[in-house]
Amino acid sequence: DMYGHDAGDHVLKRIVTVIRKHIRTTDHLFRWGGDEFLLLYRGLKPENIMRVCQNLLDAVSAEIHSFGGRQETVSLSMGITYFRETDTDYPDALKRADIALYKSKVNGKNQANIEL
C-alpha cells in the first residue's frame, strides 16, 4: 500500500513467478482475490507438506524488491488443509484453510499453519 498499486502489482507478479518455479506441473495456482492465492497440490504426502511450504516461504522472502530508492522484502502467510473424503464441497476445505491462514497472520506472518 505504501508504494502504490503499480508496485503492488509488480510484487504479486514476482511472487507468482517464484511460486511457479517451486511447484510441480501437476499443481495449480489460482489468484483468490487481492493478495490471496490458492495453491492446489494433488497427491502431496502429509509428511512433505511443511517442507514444501518452508521452501516457498524461503524463496519468496529471499526476493529483493526496489521501490522509491529503497529495497524491500516480502513474506507469505500460508493456511493449509486437506480436502477430506467427508467434505461435501470445496467451501469446507476453504474454511479450514482460511482459519489456518488467520493463525499464520496473527502469529507473526511469514509462516504456514495447518488446520485439519
Image: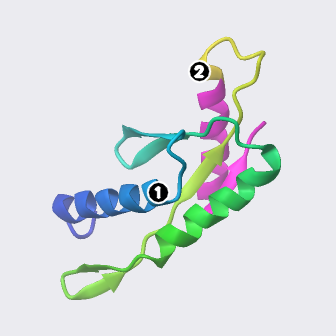
Q: Is residue 19 left or right of residue 35?
A: right
At a point 69% along the width and 27% down the height, the residue shown is: 83
Q: Is residue 2 above or below residue 114?
A: below
Task: Determine the secondary structure under disc 1.
Answer: helix
Residue 98 shown in magenta:
yes
Which amino acid type is shown beneath numbered disc 2?
Tyr
- Between the C-alphas of marks 2 and 1, the distance is 22 Å
At a point 46% along the width and 57% down the height, the residue shown is: 19
Residue 38 shown in magenta:
no
Which amino acid type is shown beneath numbered disc 1?
Ile
- CB-based contact (under 8 Å), mark 2 and mark 1: no
Q: Which residue in the protein does label 1 denote? A: 19
Where does the magenta region start and end?
93-116
Rendering coords of residue 1 (x, y %): 28, 62
Dividing the image into 4 quarters, which one contains the C terminus? top right
Give residue 80's mark: none
Q: Is residue 101 above or below residue 51?
A: above
Rendering coords of residue 96 (x, y %): 67, 33
Q: Which residue in the protein does label 2 denote? A: 90
Q: Is residue 84 left or right of residue 105?
A: right
The answer to whether any part of residue 109 appears in the image is no
Tag nearer the camera, 2 or 1: 1
Q: Is residue 12 left or right of residue 80?
A: left
Q: Residue furthest right?
A: 47
- Lower sequence index among marks 2 and 1: 1
